[in-house]
Amino acid sequence: MMMRVHEQGDEVHVELSGIAGRQQRVLAALTECQRLVCDCPDGAPVAKASVSVRSGSNDMRIKLKGQNGFRCEASVIYRCLRHALIEQPRQLLPASSAVVA
């Protein structure tokens, strides 16, 4: 999987390739990242960013645009998605995950 996150004007663009069959995992990770980054002290769910998603069989393009004065930070989104999609799945693999024939 390859991931590129960059700012374009007041939007953050996330481009992923090599994700065949993992689109739902990407959306779940994005939702979790948004919850962590945008959590309100009173627990009330507030939409801090509008999200636009375009998905193909092996790639996704996501646009995030802050609302009500909230600014999406590309570096924060990148680190959160990297942890959720790349680092965390590796940590979940058991040490003896190799298949022996």
Image: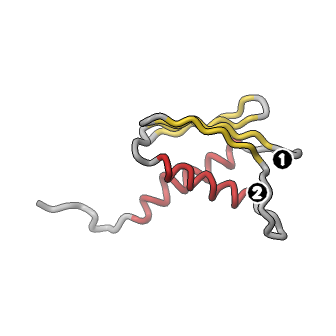
Which image quadrant is residue 14 in?
Answer: top right
Q: Which residue shows up at 24% across the image and 61% down it?
A: 98
Residue 33 visible in the snapshot: yes
Marker disc for residue 38: 2
Residue 44: percent from left, percent from top: 80, 66
Residue 87: percent from left, percent from top: 49, 56
- Which residue is the extreme one toward the right? 69
Q: Which residue shows up at 69% across the image and 61% down it?
A: 36
Marker disc for residue 19: none
Mark 2 → mark 1, Cα distance in angstroms:
9 Å
Q: Is residue 67 left or right of residue 74?
A: right
* Residue placed most toward the observer, 71 or 55: 55
- Which residue is the extreme one toward the left? 101
Q: Earlier in the sequence, mark 2 or mark 1?
A: 2
Q: Is residue 49 above or below residue 35?
A: above
Residue 5 visible in the snapshot: no
Marker disc for residue 70: 1
How busy is the neighbourhood of tag 2: few (under 14 within 10 Å), some, or many (20 plus)? some
Mark 1 belongs to which amino acid? Phe
Residue 28: percent from left, percent from top: 56, 55
